[in-house]
Image (tube, rainbow, N blue to C red):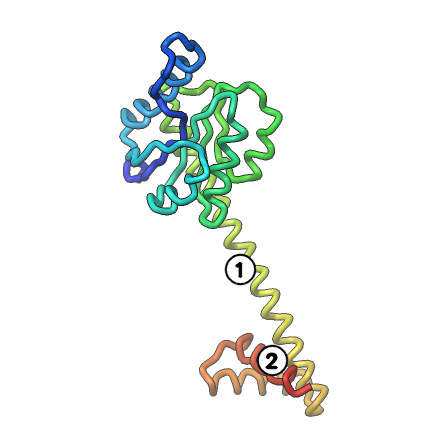
Amino acid sequence: MTEALRIVVVAPDLDVADPGDEHAVRLAGRSRALRIGLLENGFNLVATLPADVFLSERIAQLQPDLIVVDAESDARDALEYVVLATRDARRPIVLFTNDEDTSHVKDAVAAGVCAYVVAGLAPQRIRPILDVALARFRHEQALRAELAGARAELRERKIIERAKGLLMQRQGLSEQEAYAKLRKAAMDKSLRLAELAQRMLDALDLLD
C-alpha cells in the first residue's frame, strides 16, 4: 500500500541564516511545502537528509522504500549523491525541482530517477506522481530480473553444451548419450544439470 511506503527526502536545510536572502527563503519554503504535502497525502516521511558524503550510510541505515529529492539550482549535484547512495541497492527516486535546465534529464533517468518533476509541488499532484514513479520502478526491476534470468539461462546452456561436447569427444558418445550421462550424474548427486556440468569442467581444467 502507498500509505506504508517509507520515504526519505533529500533536501537542503530549512534553516535560513539570513532572512534577507530571498533565494534561500524561497527554497526553504518550497522544501517545507513538499514535506507538508507528503504528510498530508498520508506518506510515511521517515527522515529528511542533506545531499552530502554521508548520504549512502544514512540511507543504508534507514532502508527507505522511495527517495524524494528536493533540489533547485543544484539538482545535478544532489542527484550525484543520491545515485551513489543507491548504487548497490536500487530504489525509486523522484526529483522535484525548479531548475529549468533540463539538459541532464536523460542522464538522471538513466541513473535511476523514475520521475523528474519541474515546478510540480501542488499537494494534489504528489500522490499520483509517486504512485507512477513506484509503478515504473517495479516494472523496470521486473524487466531487469527477467533479463538477468535470460542471461543466466544462456550461460548455463553454454556450460552444459561445453560439458556435453567434452564427453562426446573424450568418451566417443553421441550427443544424446552425453546428455543422458550428464543428466543421470546430476540426478544421482542431487545437483542441477548446469552445476554438475560446471563441476565437471572445473575438474577437467585441473587435470589439463
Residue neighbourhood size for the residue with mark 2, other residues' Cα within 10 Å, grouped as few (<14), some (14–19), many (≥20):
few
- Residue sitting nearer the eye, 197 or 46: 46
Q: Position of residue 137 (x, y in %)?
A: 46, 41
The reply, left or right, for residue 49 in relation to residue 177 is: left
Query: Measuring 46% from the left and 46% from the top, which residue is drawn there?
Result: 90
Specify the amino acid type for callout 2.
Answer: Asp
Q: Quadrant of residue 106?
A: top right
Q: State the mark number for residue 45.
A: none
Circle 1 residue: 149
Q: Residue furthest bottom?
A: 171
Q: Nearer the viewer, mark 1 or mark 2?
A: 2
Q: Quadrant of residue 148?
A: bottom right
Q: Position of residue 163 (x, y in %)?
A: 64, 80
Dot 1: what SS? helix
Residue at point 42%, 40% (across, down):
54
- Pointers 1 and 2 in contact (CB under 8 A)? no
Rendering coords of residue 97 (x, y %): 47, 23
Above or below residue 121? Residue 104 is: below
> The residue tagged with tag 2: helix, strand or loop?
helix
Query: Mark 2 — residue?
Result: 202
Nearest to the observer: residue 55 or residue 149: 55
Whole-angstrom CA distance, mark 1 to mark 2, is 23 Å
Q: The residue under label 1 is which amino acid type?
A: Gly
Q: Quadrant of the N terminus?
A: top left
N-terminal label among 1 and 2: 1
Image position of 143 with respect to 24: above or below: below
Quick one: label 1, few (<14), some, or many (20+) residues within 10 Å?
few
Residue beneath the point at 44% across and 20% down: 120
Residue 28 x %, y %: 38, 18
* Above/below status of 137 relative to 117: below
Residue lying at the far front of the rendered structure:
17
